[in-house]
Image: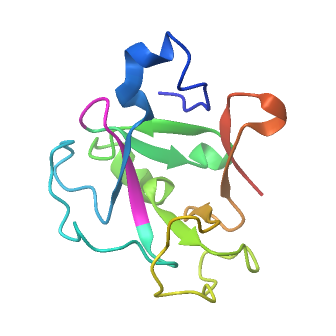
Amino acid sequence: DSVFTKDYLDSYEQTVKKTYQWKVRSKPGDGGVSYVDPKSGNCVKYGDMIYVQNTDANNKWLSGNRSGNDSVFTKDYLDSYEQTVKKTYQWKVRSKPGDGGVSYVDPKSGNCVKYGDMIYVQNTDANNKWLSGNRSGNDSVFTKD
């Protein structure tokens, strides 16, 4: 269930291509990778709250700030226990960190994210928790202050 940054072009990694593919969702839906999101075809906007689903298997969503720590995993959002920690699955797309608060209004709020834009991805479980990867060349992914 751990999440990493790896070399996609590595020969072994080519045998597990779907682990690199993610879908941006407006809601979890039924958990199926083939689920058609109600906002399909629309752009993701700054300030939107999103879910990020891995396409390797059904029912695997990105979850961060687990138990207040920095770990990021893929878990089954629809599992009964996971329903008690829903906000660990919710992410906001930001143009800048602002004050770090989950309720911070992004200055580009409502504008579409465009190809080439620099974005920040914030976990909504707590203030100041941001998606971070490839730290010092390490392949782990964290949510950090």
Report the side of 54 relative to 7 (left or right): left
Estimate the x, y position of residue 71 in percent, counting from the top left.
63, 39
At 39% from the left edge and 38% from the top edge, which residue is drawn?
A: 21
Estimate the x, y position of residue 139 in percent, counting from the top left.
68, 28
Q: How many numbered marks are there?
A: 0
Q: Residue furthest right?
A: 136
Residue 10's quadrant in the figure?
A: top right
Report the side of 138 relative to 13 (left or right): right
Estimate the x, y position of residue 50 in percent, counting from the top left.
41, 64
Residue 95's quadrant in the figure?
A: bottom right
Colour approach in the figure? rainbow
At 49% from the left edge and 73% from the top edge, which residue is drawn?
A: 113
Look at the image and say whether residue 85 sits in the magenta stretch: no
At 39% from the left edge and 57% from the top edge, which residue is drawn?
A: 51
Q: Nearer the viewer, residue 15 or 19?
A: 15
At 53% from the left edge and 87% from the top edge, which residue is drawn?
A: 109
Residues in magenta? 50-58
Q: Nearer the viewer, residue 98 or 136?
A: 136
Q: In the rendered view, would you say 126 is above or below 109?
A: above
Report the side of 129 relative to 123 (left or right): right
Q: Nearer the viewer, residue 91 or 18?
A: 18
On-image quarter of the C terminus: bottom right
Estimate the x, y position of residue 20 in percent, counting from the top left.
44, 33
